[in-house]
Image: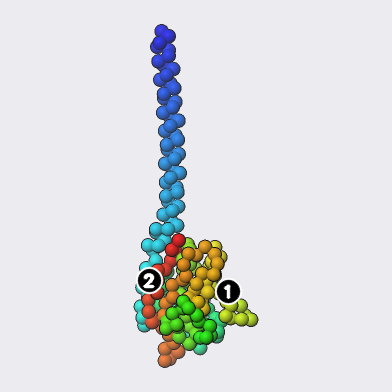
Amino acid sequence: MVEEERSEQDSVKITRRRFTLGIMLAAAAGAFGSLLSLFKVLTPEAKAGYVATVAPGDLLVYAKGAQQGTVLQASAFKVGDSVLAYPKGKAKNPANLVRLVRLEESEFASPTHKGLTSQGFVAYSAICTHLGCIVGWKETLSHPASSYLECPCHDSIFNPAQGAKVMGGPAPVPLAQIGVKVSKNGELVFTSGFTGPIGPQA
């Protein structure tokens, strides 16, 4: 009789242990799954999603605002101006978004590809290399040369006069440059693809 009671108690203990172990394993699996999903969102899918379709000869058009879709004319920009642009007819692909800036030609320094600039115009991918936010433009009115590109999400700063070199923040690499030129009729045209990978590189 005593042995039967002990056997039942042992059985209850084993059942409780198995139940507790099962809960712990389920919790661990859930936590791992959540971490895996987070990692997947922040890195692989983001990198794989940015494939630009810009081609030499594509016209630059305004990406937003009242003039959205209108071809950019060089005469509309003064030194220190910047705008978001897409290649004409290819606005549906976010990987094509660029940040166009106009500076003094004399301000460009390495590692800027000077052969990809024209009359002070330079263009870079507008997608931050940290987590893919769209970079903005911080203009210093008193001295345009000190203006910079900035990511609004995590404050990465890029120098447009020096190949969009990272000047601060978590972005691991510069924004990729893309060639632009001013055509004979004053329109802005792409002359190359991007010089490097675009989108998150963390």
Asked if the residues shown at circle 2 and circle 1 are in contact, with their CB atoms under 8 angstroms apart, the answer is no
Please give the name of the residue rendered at 43% of the width and 91% of the height, measured from the top-left corner: 185
Q: Can you see residue 187?
A: no
Quadrant in which the C terminus is drawn: bottom left
- Checking the image for residue 73, the label placed there is none
Q: Can you see residue 124?
A: yes
Residue found at the far bottom of this picture:
184
Where residue 77 appears, as percent x and y from the top left, is 53, 85
Query: What's under tag 2, amino acid-wise?
Result: Ala
Q: Secondary structure at mark 2?
A: loop
Nearest the viewer among 107 and 1 is 107
Q: Secondary structure at mark 1?
A: strand
- Checking the image for residue 52, the label placed there is 2
Nearest the viewer among 112 and 56 is 112
Residue found at the far right of this picture:
142
Q: Which residue is mark 1?
A: 138
Where residue 20 appears, as percent x and y from the top left, is 45, 30
Q: CA distance from mark 2 to mark 1?
A: 25 Å
Where residue 55 appears, as percent x and y from the top left, is 35, 78
Quadrant in which the N terminus is drawn: top left
Query: What's under tag 1, amino acid-wise?
Result: Lys
Nearest to N terminus: mark 2 or mark 1: 2
Please give the name of the residue rendered at 43% of the width and 32% of the height, measured from the top-left corner: 21
